[in-house]
Structures are given as C-alpha cells and as structure tokens.
Image (cartoon, coloured by chain):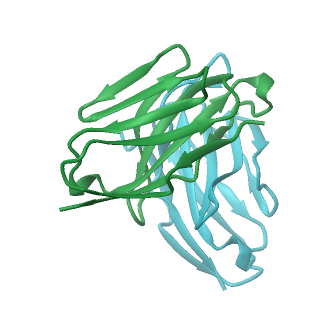
Chain colours: A green, B cyan
Amino acid sequence: KQEVTQIPAALSVPEGENLVLNCSFTDSAIYNLQWFRQDPGKGLTSLLLIQSSQREQTSGRLNASLDKSSGRSTLYIAASQPGDSATYLCAAFSRPNAGNNRKLIWGLGTSLAVNP
Amino acid sequence: NAGVTQTPKFQVLKTGQSMTLQCAQDMNHEYMSWYRQDPGMGLRLIHYSVGAGITDQGEVPNGYNVSRSTTEDFPLRLLSAAPSQTSVYFCASSYLWTGVPSGEQYFGPGTRLTVT
C-alpha cells in the first residue's frame, strides 16, 4: 500500500535562502506526483505536476524533481520570500497494482515560515 | 472559467441534522472527489467519481453519500450530522486519461462545517 511522507513537518528559514522540501513514497508504481501550496484557512493551489515519465518540472522559482527508483520527490524553492510562507503538500497517484487505484495518496505537509 | 466552486463557505449544524454540500466545476473534468481536512490527519478522501453515474468510496465514506448525475456537479450529503464530522471539506476535479486522473487536481475553496 502506497504511503507518502514529508519531512520535515515544519521549517523556518531567513528570507533569501534556497531550500528543499522532501517527499517520499513507498511504492514506485505511480502515475504522477503533484505539489500543492495551502495558505492558512484557504484551499489548495497546485504548484507543479510531474508525470511518471518525467524527471523534473519548473515554474518560476520552483523546481520539483522525481526519482521513482529511490521513491523521492523534492521541491526546490530559490531565493525564498516571506510570501512563500505556507504549508506545502505532495500527493501521488498510484498505479492499479499498488492497491490505490484512482486515488491520490497525500503527505501531511511541510509548514514553511520564511522570516524577513 | 470559474474553476471549482463550493457552497456554502461556512455552515453550523446541530447533531442529527442533514445537509448537502455543493460542488460544481466548469472544466468538463471527468474525475471529481471530496476530501475532509482535519488538524494532524491531513487530507482524507471521502468519495470520488470518474464520470456521471459512477461513484466509489474513499477512506472515510461512513456518514456521507454522493451522486453524480451530471459531469459538472458532485454534491456531498451528510445524512445525520455528528460532531465528528466537524471539519473543512474540499472538492477537487481533474481530467482522466485511460481511466486515470492524469492532470492537475483543481480544488475548491472549501466549506468549513461545525456540528454542535
């Protein structure tokens, strides 16, 4: 059964730092993996979607990588800003033989605080 | 496009009352799903649908019903509200490709439900 883990649960950094958020999954048989951002009291916003055939995706200061062999995805945020403060979640769609057909499996998220 | 819309934004119910949370999308997405989000427990899937007339259970379906009579709408019914159903509820949608949610998941803004 697929499980998704995000470490650390919380992270506090000074403005301007480059940082990496980690997402691990136990079964490499995934269709895709998606990173989301959630601001306090708000809904979820999709940041990046990586299909299983891809190694990375980039959007502005964000870069997400996918390594199925090691069961890891990382979200890289360059030159962090206070506006990046939010909770970041990753979620994976597993292939049918992993027992979680057509359901996203979610991590619990990393709560990021970027201090001015 | 309005994207994914949810109504109401806030709701207070008494134990035993029933109600329907509304979800609609205007992107012609086949896949729609309902989640609840509780502190420390992450997002948990309640029900999902892969098209009109087709629904299936997620992790925590008890106490909830769904139906999908059109592609656009996917209402969630609470049959007899209990305090344990106090939560934030999110609806999401995406395209399907060969039966698998293949694109980005789009989320609604959420409904904050309190059951007293």
Residue displayed at 48% across by 16% down? A54
Residue at 56% x, 50% y is B91
Nearest the eye: B58 or A113: A113
Toward the top, the furthest residue is A53
- Residue B27 coordinates in the image, percent (x, y): 46, 33
**On screen, B74 above or below A10?**
above
**Is A80 displayed left or right of B60 in the figure?**
left
Q: Nearer the viewer, residue B90 or A36?
A: A36
Q: Quadrant of the N terminus of chain B?
A: top left
The picture places residue B40, in percent across and down from the top left corner, at 60, 65
Query: As drawn, is A22 to the left or to the right of B32?
Result: left
Measuring from the top left, give residue B26's x and y in whole percent: 46, 38
Q: Quick check: A1 above or below A9?
A: above
Please state, as top left, top right, bottom left or bottom right, where the C terminus of chain B lies in the image.
Answer: bottom right
> In the drawing, does residue B98 fall left or right of residue A49?
right
At horizontal 24% and vertical 55% (from top left) the residue drawn is A83
